[in-house]
Image: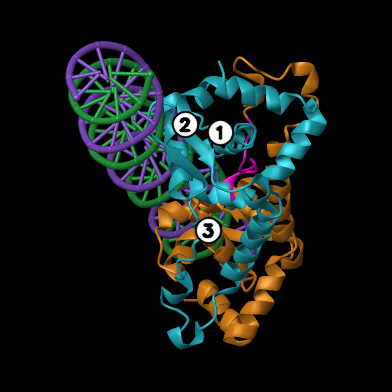
Chain colours: A orange, B cyan, C green, D purple
Amino acid sequence: MKLSGGVEWALHCCVVLTAASEPVPAARLAQLHDVSPSYLAKQMQALSRAGLVRSVQGKTGGYVLTRKASDITLLDVVQAVDGAAPAFVCTEIRQRGPLATPPEKCVKPCPIARAMGAADAAWRASLAGVTIADLVTSVETDSGPDALPGIGTWLTGG
Amino acid sequence: MKLSGGVEWALHCCVVLTAASEPVPAARLAQLHDVSPSYLAKQMQALSRAGLVRSVQGKTGGYVLTRKASDITLLDVVQAVDGAAPAFVCTEIRQRGPLATPPEKCVKPCPIARAMGAADAAWRASLAGVTIADLVTSVETDSGPDALPGIGTWLTGG
DNA sequence: GACTCACTACTCGGATACCTTCTGTCCGAGTTACTAAGG
DNA sequence: CCTTAGTAACTCGGACAGAAGGTATCCGAGTAGTGAGTC
C-alpha cells in the first residue's frame, strides 16, 4: 500500500502551474523541484493523457492547465498518475475451496469487499473535496502571498 | 497504490477463525481457501507478530484469535499485514531547488501533505469503524446463520 | 495398573529465489520561432 | 520595407534498462501427543 512517488511531483506541478499563464516546459518544472527531468516528464504525460494539462509543442512549448484550479481536485491528479484502480481487489476466494459459497449466493460483493470498498470511497471522497485552488490558498497562508507569483515569474522568465 | 493481496486472505482467515475454538493450522486455512499454504503462513505470521492471533505449536497446534471479534478492527488486520506506513510520504521537495522554501517557514507540513494525510486518516477511520464481528454478522445475513459454524467444524474436524 | 521416558509426527518461524511493478533514462517525431535572402 | 523559404533549436511522446518490493517456496527449530518399557 504505497502511493507512487510521482504523485507528489504532479501535485506540486499543478500548484505552481496556476502561477504561470504561459506554457512551462517539463524540464523547467524539474529544475524548480530539483528532480529527474525525464521521470517528471513521464508524470506530466500522464496528466496530459488524463486531460488535466494541455501540452504545447515547439520552441516556446510546455504544459498549461486546461481548467481553472478550482475545477481540479486532488483525486483527479492522483487517479491520472497512479491509475483509477481501487486499492483492494476482491478475488472471490469465498467461491473457491471445498466449502465454496455457491455462486447463486454471491449476488452481492462479499462483506470484506464491501467494507474495503467503503474505506476506499471515503479516501476518494476526501481527495475529491480538495481542489488545487484550495492548495494555492493554503500555500499563500503558509508562505505569504508573494511566494507563488515569484515562482510563476521564475518559471516563465529566467 | 495497490494493497497487498495477502490482506484479503488474512481478513477471511480472521472471520473463519471466529467459528473455531480450537487452534487451526495455517495449512488447513489454506486448504479451505484454496491458496498457497506457504504464502498464507507468511500472512499468519504477520498477524501473530501484531498480536492479533496466538500461535500454538505442536501436533494439535495452529492459530487462535487473541481477542474477541468485536475487539479486532479491519485497520488492525490491514496494518498487521501491509504495514502501518502511510500511503503518501512527503519528501519535502518544497525545500529543494533554486526557489526552495526556507526551513524556518516549514514548521507545518506542506498543504499537499496535509490534504493527503487527511484522506489517509479518513481511510483509516473507515477501516477502524468495522470490526471482525461486524463482518461475521454480514456473512450470516448473506449466507445464512449455518454457514460459519459449518466452516468451523470443518476446520477443526475433518 | 500407574508412572516415566524416548520417539514420532506435526506445528510455527525465518531465510531463500522468482517475478511483477515502479523508478529512471534515452532517443526520435513534430512544431515553433528565428534568420536571411529575394522581390 | 515586406514577403517567403529555409534552418535550427526546442518541445513532447513513447520505447528501453535497472532496482525495489511483493509473491511464492523451502527447510530447520520447537512442541504436544503417543507408545513402549519399567516399577
Q: Which residue is mark 3?
A: B86
Q: Which residue is mark 2?
A: B40
First in residue order: circle 3 vs circle 2: 2
Give the quarter of the image for residue A63. Answer: bottom right
**Residue at 47% across, 43% down:** B54
CA gap, disc 1 and disc 3: 21 Å
Residue B142: where, in percent of width, then height?
80, 30
Chain under numbered label 2: B
**Residue at 52% across, 20% down:** B31
The residue closer to the viewer here, A102 or B119, is A102
Nearer to us of marks 3 and 2 is: 2
- Identify the main secondary structure in magenta: loop
Q: Are marks 1 and 3 on the same chain?
A: yes
Residue C5: where, in percent of width, then height?
19, 27
- B8 to the left or right of A51: left
Residue A103 shows in the view: yes
